[in-house]
Amino acid sequence: MRHPSVKFLLHGDEAELNPLLAKRKKLAGRVEVRHAPERVRMEDKPSQIVRRGRNTSMWRAIESVSKKEADVALSAGNTGALMAMALLQLRPLDSIDRPAIAALWPTMRGQSVVLDVGANISADAEQLVDFAVMGQAFARAVLGLEKPTLGILNVGEEDVKGNESVRGAAQILRTAGLPIEFQGFVEGDDISGGTVDVVVTDGFTGNVALKTAEGAAKLVIGYLRGALTRSLLGKIGAVFASGALAALRRKLDPRASNGGVFLGLNGIVVKSHGGTDALGFASAVDMAIDMVKADVISKIVADRANLALRAPAVASGVGGS
């Protein structure tokens, strides 16, 4: 059993949850069910659910973090509602303007951190710098990188490319003094290539890129399955290549890296993909536990404070652009 020392608070309808837990003998003594009579639906609007959702399982899960009864909240529900509730109950860190959602991304070199993947439709230069601070702290804590490489997603690598926000953020990061190797701008194909350890972008672009990559992975797997089952020769080839094909399937499986982390709050919240299965949700649990063990919030606070000390010099540089 993974994580034998971890205990769980399970929020929801106890009439539904208790019979399910009774079938899982290995969880005896490790799970406490807390009754929540209501739930957040996928079609619920965040603004409405924040006002009337205090009896929902989602609200109660986040509340347990705000009350220090739990170290992390994990949900596979409505992303907008989860972010709204987390903002209201946990509040952003003093030094962070907006939280962001960070995701681990499988690459040709291993894994990279990409953020934001959905919390903010747009972001100005200072907010992108905040994302960079949070992303590099995530990479150092979870991926074990002493000095991660970092790039800003853009339409080209040249310094003159992109809008004012990405150019301004790049100028700040060049002199920020963060424990990173700033690589400047990266393009879309650099994400899966693993060109840098941390890719920074706004939530609109990041979410589109994430969903596109997931769709492309499913397409490749579908093409392979079709090619290897279409003929007798293909089936024979599949037998000989079964080991390599299994490794490829694991590499492309989005369940292995399931879990987006809300960074920049006074507490940790992890969002699992709503359509995942038990394996994918287990990956999100792994992510949640890793975030707690790595003490990512403390690293973000320390690095953002160090950046603030350099703010006067940075600000004068941006003003001259």
Image (tube, rainbow, N blue to C red):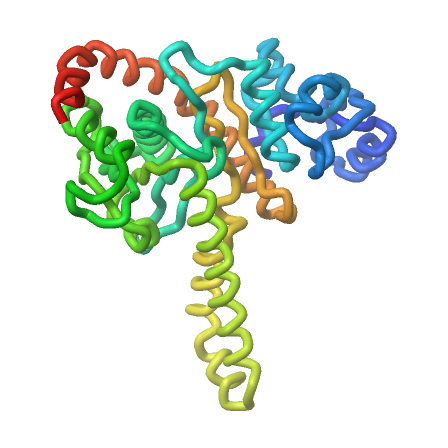
Would you place residue 130 above or below residue 144 in this image? above
On the question of residue 9 being in view, the answer is: no
Would you place residue 152 above or below residue 295 in this image? below
User: At x 25% / y 42%, what residue is drawn?
Assistant: 162
Q: Residue furthest right?
A: 15
Q: Position of residue 271 (x, y in %)?
A: 56, 34
Quadrant of the frame with the N terminus: top right
In the displayed structure image, the side of residue 188 where residue 28 appears, left or right: right
Q: Position of residue 45 (x, y in %)?
A: 67, 31
User: At x 59% / y 34%, what residue is drawn?
Assistant: 79
Would you place residue 305 above or below residue 24 in this image? above
User: At x 54% / y 38%, what residue is drawn?
Assistant: 284
In the displayed structure image, the side of residue 196 where residue 313 appears, left or right: left
Q: Residue furthest bottom?
A: 232
On the question of residue 92 being in view, the answer is: yes
User: Who is closer to the viewer here, 166 or 300?
Assistant: 166
In the displayed structure image, the side of residue 321 where residue 187 appears, left or right: right
Label tally = 0
The quarter holding residue 13 reads top right
Quadrant of the frame with the C terminus: top left
User: At x 22% / y 49%, what residue is drawn?
Assistant: 156
Q: Position of residue 5 (x, y in %)?
A: 57, 25
Q: Position of residue 93 (x, y in %)?
A: 43, 13
User: Who is closer to the viewer here, 114 or 205?
Assistant: 205
The quarter holding residue 145 reads top left
In the displayed structure image, the side of residue 62 where residue 286 appears, left or right: left
